[in-house]
Amino acid sequence: MKRAWWKEAVIYQIYPRSFMDSNGDGIGDLKGITSKLDYLQYLGIDVIWLSPVYKSPNDDNGYDISDYQDIMDEFGTMEDFDEMLAAAHERGIRIVMDLVVNHTSDEHRWFVESRKSKDNPYRDYYIWHAGRDAQTPPNNWGSCFSGPAWQYDEETDMYYLHLFSKKQPDLNWDNPKVRKEVFDMMTWWCDKGIDGFRMDVISMISKTEEMPDGEVHGLYGDFSPYCVHGPNVHRYLREMNEKVLSRYDIMTVGETSGVTTEQAKQYAGEDTHELNMVFQFEHVEWDGPGKYGKWTDERLPLTTLKKIMSRWQTELYGKAWNSLFWDNHDQPRAVSSFGDDRPQYREASAKMLATCLHMQQGTPYIYQGEELGMTNYPFQNPAEFRDIESINAYREWCIDGPVSHEDFWPCIIFKSRDNARTPVQWDTSEHAGFTTGTPWIAVNPNYREINARAETADPDSVFHYYKKLIGLRKEHPIIVYGKYEPLLEDSEELFVYTRTLDGEKLLVVCSFCDHETSFTIPDPFVGAPCIISNMGNNYDSAQMTLKPYEAFVLKK
Ligand code: GLC
Ligand code: CA
């Protein structure tokens, strides 16, 4: 397997709005990030993925960009950006930008022009269609943020496509001018010295020419067979690779919701010249008995989780590269979704989850606050939501729709993206030290117990456990390059696997349950040294009893 720095790196995601506020307006900003680089260096991460900081009217918190070469007013200036980039590089930290080019904001000058007339030079930068009639859009597709995926525009009496909010019109990638604009913009950022791109919904950039009605799930038709992994997506990515990516020593990761292992081998194959790695979502978008679309309060059974993760480990081995994550700015908090956020189990289960993920093959991502074991927010009522997706979903399913508040509430608070977007908890001062003003979104009241100041001072904290895991990765190439093999696949309590590289072997044992379990250490590992454990147990004899959420790794 080829070695690469981005295979050996640990990445930390920053959602700037909620990371650190430097000027008391209640909104995180670039200077805030710069002020916390020492903290990140101490944690030991190699790369920051920065969620969007570009000019934006913030309909979707920066994922609606009105100028790709300027900074959002609330976050600071381009000077602040350059300062942050230089300060990160001084500390050996690389910065990966969020590239949101499936769509722009409707306030981007391309769209402002495009909607003016049918013969405007920018008309074909977007996807315009005539309606079936004045009141009916071209087809039945629904948008990811509720309502139809088409918006009527009076000016030219046509509809434009928006797979997300109506303030996020989809770009027309079949237009070579659009591709050139995007590639030029990317080149401009690369020349500035940034270190890569996380590509937002990149699997959706190519749409089929035919746009038939989709199968109805919930209230609208499903666009995915026509817009996800579309006919030209790989051609466009290879073109991007040739014109931009291959010319720099940067890393790329594609957000490819719905991707299969077969498709991932194309997107992120060792020799396919597209992307370095993908984000796949099978373990977080699992909708087994899903109740109302993505809104559910069901948890994934451990056997299902293991089956999904093991399949990704095994099928990509030696062929393509994967990303490892439990959460991000679109997902609820890891410890609340996959672990146990009750006070007596929170720390143990947060460390266990970290062990389980960081010992697998792939590049691990830590979402801000995850290294502290931050939890979901205890929402009391819908007025607390800030996220367009949650606000619209509550309206569509409950206020205007068929579902009662009692039935919907547990689902939306379990899944809402706002769980991940409450401010990072820095210390015990007011608003968790995030801001001296009024935070744009509520701070989780548990900041008095869970915060960076306390955890950096406590060698047994979740923070120090992450720091240790990151260090181990630097020490043992087997963690990066070893071959994965699952054990005890039918257990609903334990996630156990081995890694093998040359003559070395790792045994990774993680308990996913809140009671004691018995376990027999497999023969070759009896007496092998323990390189990390969240309980500080003794692992010398084969027969043992695991404590709730215990995790350990033996190496021989
Ligand atoms: C991606 C982003 C998400 C955003 C959406 C539209 O899924 O991660 O936050 O809302 O794309 O850009
Ligand atoms: Ca601010």
Image: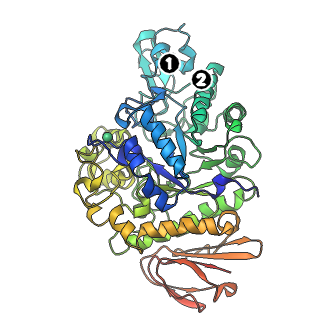
Numbered label tally: 2
Mark 2 = which residue?
181
Query: Label 1 vs label 2: CA separation?
Result: 10 Å
Q: Can residue 51 be seen in this view?
A: no
The quarter of the displayed image where residue 528 is located: bottom right
Q: Does the residue labelled 1 lie within 8 Å of ligand 1?
A: no
Q: What residue type is labelled 2?
A: Glu
Q: In this view, does 129 lie to the left or right of 348?
A: right
* Colour scheme in use: rainbow
Q: How crowded is mark 1: few (under 14 residues within 10 Å), some or many (20 or more)?
A: many
Ligand 1 under 8 Å from disc 2 Cβ: no
Three-letter residue code for mark 1: Trp
- Assign the C terminus to one quadrant of the image: bottom right
Q: Do the residues labelled 1 and 2 touch (CB within 8 Å)?
A: yes
Q: Nearer the viewer, residue 345 or 370?
A: 370
Residue 502 at what x, y percent from top left? Answer: 77, 72
Helix, strand or loop at mark 1: helix
Point out residue 187 in the picture as x, y percentages from the top left corner: 62, 30
Vertical order, 215 against 171 (above or below): below
On the image, which quarter does residue 219 sit in?
top left
Check disc 2 and report its element: helix, strand or loop: helix
Would residue 465 be visible to someone looking at this image? yes
Q: Which of 534 and 407 is in front in this view?
A: 534
Of labels 1 and 2, earlier in sequence is 1
Please state, as top left, top right, bottom left or bottom right, where the N terminus lies in the image.
bottom right
Q: Residue placed at 50% from the left, 88% from the top?
A: 545
Residue at the front extreme, as displayed? 90
Q: Name the residue under label 1.
A: 110
For discs 1 and 2, the disc positioned in front in the rendered view = 2
Q: Where is residue 207 in the image (x, y as percent from the top left)?
A: 61, 29
Residue at the image position 46 percent from the left and 56 percent from the top:
40
Q: Position of residue 506 (x, y in %)?
A: 65, 75
